[in-house]
Amino acid sequence: MTSFCHKFMAAYEAAAQEQAEKPLPHLQSGFWLQSYGFSKACLNRYCQIMASKHPGLSCVACSPGFVETEMVKSYRGDSKLKTVE
């Protein structure tokens, strides 16, 4: 699994570099959000697998919610940033 993750990250970083100046694909349709959500689901499952294989290891996947980062700077949609209040 570690080898797969390293290969995936190398491919991801190459694709990110190639697309750095282009808008997010399918921005209007929201398709990129579905892909992002799927990747988060995969990470959650990976943490579950690691926790079951290594009971002494704490495996946690945190989701901070929508965070303004470089990845989403061009996305505004109808989303509103919320606070905990």
Image (tube, rainbow, N blue to C red):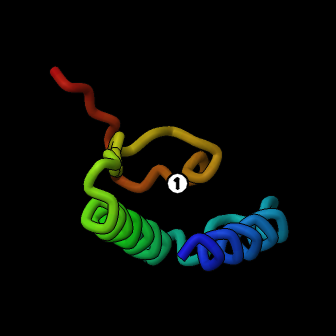
Q: Nearer the viewer, residue 37 or 58?
A: 58
Question: What is the three-letter code of the residue carrying label 1?
Answer: Tyr
Q: Quadrant of residue 36?
A: bottom left
Q: Quadrant of the C terminus?
A: top left
Q: Residue at x 34, y 45 (%)?
A: 62
Q: Between residues 83 and 52, which one lies in front from this camera angle?
A: 52
Residue linked to disc 1 = 75
What is the x, y in percent for residue 71? 60, 52
User: Can residue 79 be seen in this snapshot?
Assistant: no
Q: Secondary structure at mark 1?
A: loop
The foreground one among 11 and 7 is: 7
Rendered view: 47 above or below 67:
below
Identify the residue shown where x is 82% and y is 63%: 17
Residue 52 point in image, percent of width and height: 25, 66
- The residue lying at 70 percent from left, 76 percent from top is 7
**Residue at screen point 45% across, 40% down:** 67
Residue 72 place in picture, x, y as percent? 55, 51
- Residue neighbourhood size for the residue with mark 1, other residues' Cα within 10 Å, grouped as few (<14), some (14–19), many (≥20): some
Q: Is residue 23 above or below residue 85?
A: below
